[in-house]
Amino acid sequence: MLRTHTCGELRLADATKTATLTGWVQTIRDKGGVLWIDLRDRYGITQLLLEDGQTAPELFTIARSLGREFVLKATGTIIERKSKNPNLPTGDIELKVTALDVLNPAKLPPFLIEDDTDGGDDLRLKYRYLDLRRNPVRRNLELRHRMAQQTRLYMDGQNFIEVETPVLIKSTPEGARDFVVPSRMNPGEFYALPQSPQTFKQLLMVSGFDRYYQIVKCFRDEDLRADRQPEFTQIDCEMSFVEQEDILNMFEGLIRHLFKAVKGVDLDEVPRMTYADAMKFYGSDKPDTRFDMKFTELKGTFDTVDMTSGKGFSVFDSAELVVGINAPGCAHYTRKQLDELTEWIKRPQIGAKGLIYVRYNEDGSLKSSVDKFYSEEDLKKWAAHFGAKPGDLILIISGDAAKARKQLSELRLEMGSRLGLRDSNVFSSLWVLDFPLLEYGEEEQRWFAMHHPFTSPKPEDIPLLDSDLGAVRANAYDMVINGTEVGGGSIRIFNRDLQARMFSILGFSDDEAKAQFGFLMDAFEYGAPPHGGIAFGFDRLCSIFGGENSIRDFIAFPKNNSGRDVMIDSPSVISQAQLNELKIATVAK
C-alpha cells in the first residue's frame, strides 16, 4: 500500500507516530512561513503542515505548485494541532510533512468539490466521477451499501437463496415498454431487458426453491421523473406454500430490520388499509400518513350525506363529488394566501377549476367564499362534519369524482408540506391491500391487469370473474412509506386453468397466450405450489432512508430526465458495420 493510514483515522493518541497519507488536495493555505494543506480521501480530511526552518525548502516548492484535486502522497510525523478544529474527527492533529510526492496533477475542476457545491445538476452529472468525491454523494452510496448488506443478512437468516435470473429475455406486451436488444445470430429477432424477473421467480417456485430473492437490475423504457430511471434495482422476492399474511409478516420484518440496522429506528408495527379506504380518505393508493387531514365528503361517492344541494350553487349542484380537508390552525390565512393557493391548484399539472374555503375563526364565527349561498348555520354543520375547531381552515374541491380526489390529494400533500408535517426524519409505513384486480381502458375498450397478469384474485371473488370484473379484488399488497410506494406484490395464480382464464379476460387469444407464456403454463402442469412474492424498489428505499426526494442521488452513475448518460454520451449511434451485422437498416438521426 502507498499509505499507512487513511485521512480519516488518525487521532491525538497517534501523536509522534510516522504516517504516510494519500489523497486529493482539498484546500491550500499559504501564510508565507507556514503552509497548510487539507488532504482528503474517502474517509476524511487530515491537515498537513509545512513550516519554515523545519521543513525542507524543496517541499515548500512542491507544495506551492499544487492545485485543487492534485493527487498527493505525504509522509511525516503526527503532532498535536495548536489551533484545533472541532468540526473534524481528525481536528486535534496534523501531519508535519517530511516527504511530499505528487502522484498526479489535476486540472481545475468545473465545480467546487465541497458539501455545498456551486455545480448544477447537469454539470455534476457530466462530471459524475468528480461529484462522487463529495461527502453527501459518498454518504448516499455508503448508505446504499449498508442497505444491500443488511438485506442479504436478513434474507439469509430466513433461509432465502439468492439466484440470478437472465438479463436477455423475451419481450411481453403487458406493462411498460421494453428495452429491446437485437440478436446477431438470429437476424430479425430480439431479446428484451427484464422489467422484472417475474416469470423466472415463479418458475423457481415450481423448481422447489421455496424461498428466493435477488437484488436485481431491471429496465423500463418509460417517461422519467425524480423517482424513476430507465434502469433501476429491486429487492425481488418469492415464497412457496404461503398465503398473503405470511408475505406481509416476512417482509414487514425485512423493513423493520433495515430501519433498525441502518437508521437505528424502531419502526412501529405496520398498519393496514384497504385500497377503498385509501382512495376514500386520501384520494391516493399511496397515502402519506405522517399527518392526518383525511378527506371529508359534503356530497359523496362513498358517503351518502349531501350537505350542499338545494342552495342554488351550481358548482356544487352539478358536481359528482364535493370533498375537502381540514387544515388545522390555518384560519389566519389571508385572502392573498388563499388566492395563491387557488392559483396553485389550478395549475395545468393539477387542473382544479377552483377552491372553496371556510374559515372557522377563533371567536367561533365562520366565513366562507360561498357565503352568498350558504348560511352560517349551514357552515356550522359543515364544520361539525369535518371535525373542525376554532382556528381551522376547511378547503373544498368539487367536480368529477376521480379528478376531484386526485386534485385534493395534491392539495393535501401541499398543505402538509407548508405546515411542516412531512418531516423526512419521521417515518410512517402502511400496507395497502385489496386492490382491484382489473382496470378498464376506455380508449382500448378492454380490461388490463392492475398489477400484472399473474396476480391471483382473492379466492372469495373468483365467482365475480363471470359477472362483475370491476368488483374483483386482487390478492395483492403494496408497502407505502411516507407517501411513496416502496414495494408491491401479490399471491400468484398457480393453476393453469385460472391463468388461461386470466389471459382470456385480458384479450389474449389461446395462440397469443401460448406464444408469450406457454412455458409458464406448461410448468404449472408439473406440480406448481401455491406461491407469492413482493419486490421493493431498492433505489426508492435508499432515498427515503437518506431523506432525499430523488433516487438519482443514490445511484453511482444515473441518467438524466431524458434518459441520457451525459457523462459517457449514451445512448449514441452505432456504426453502419454494426447495423449491417445485426441486419438492421440505417436509422436516420
Image: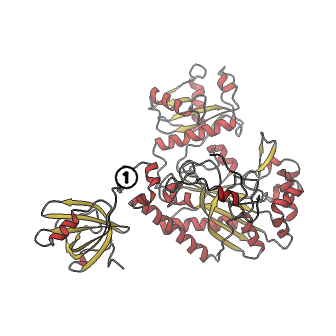
Viewer-proximal residue among 3 and 350 = 3
Q: How is the image coloured?
A: secondary structure
Q: Position of residue 521 (x, y in %)?
A: 84, 65
Q: Quadrant of residue 362?
A: top left
In this picture, residue 396 sits left or right of residue 444 = left
Residue at the spot 78% in from the left edge and 44% down from the top edge:
440
Classify the position of the N terminus by image quarter. Answer: bottom left
As drawn, the residue found furthest toward the front would be 577
Report the residue marked by disc 1.
110
Q: Quadrant of residue 182?
A: bottom right
Q: Quadrant of residue 326?
A: top right
Residue at the spot 15% in from the left edge and 59% down from the top edge:
31
Viewer-proximal residue among 2 and 65 = 65
In this picture, residue 546 sits left or right of residue 51 = right
User: Does 168 sit above or below residue 366?
Assistant: below
Task: Tell me, yes or no, if residue 141 can be seen here.
Answer: yes
Residue at the spot 68% in from the left edge and 72% down from the top edge:
212
Q: Secondary structure at mark 1?
A: loop
In this picture, residue 230 sits left or right of residue 503 = left
Q: Position of residue 72 (x, y in %)?
A: 30, 69
Neighbourhood count class around disc 1 (C-alpha, 10 Å): few under 14, some 14–19, many 20 upward: few
User: Does 373 sit above or below residue 200?
Assistant: above
User: Does 472 sit above or below residue 419?
Assistant: below
Q: Position of residue 12 (x, y in %)?
A: 24, 75
As drawn, the residue found furthest toward the left would be 53
Task: Tell me, yes or no, if residue 7 can be seen here.
Answer: no
Three-letter residue code for mark 1: Pro
> Count of labels shown?
1
Q: Position of residue 400 (x, y in %)?
A: 69, 33
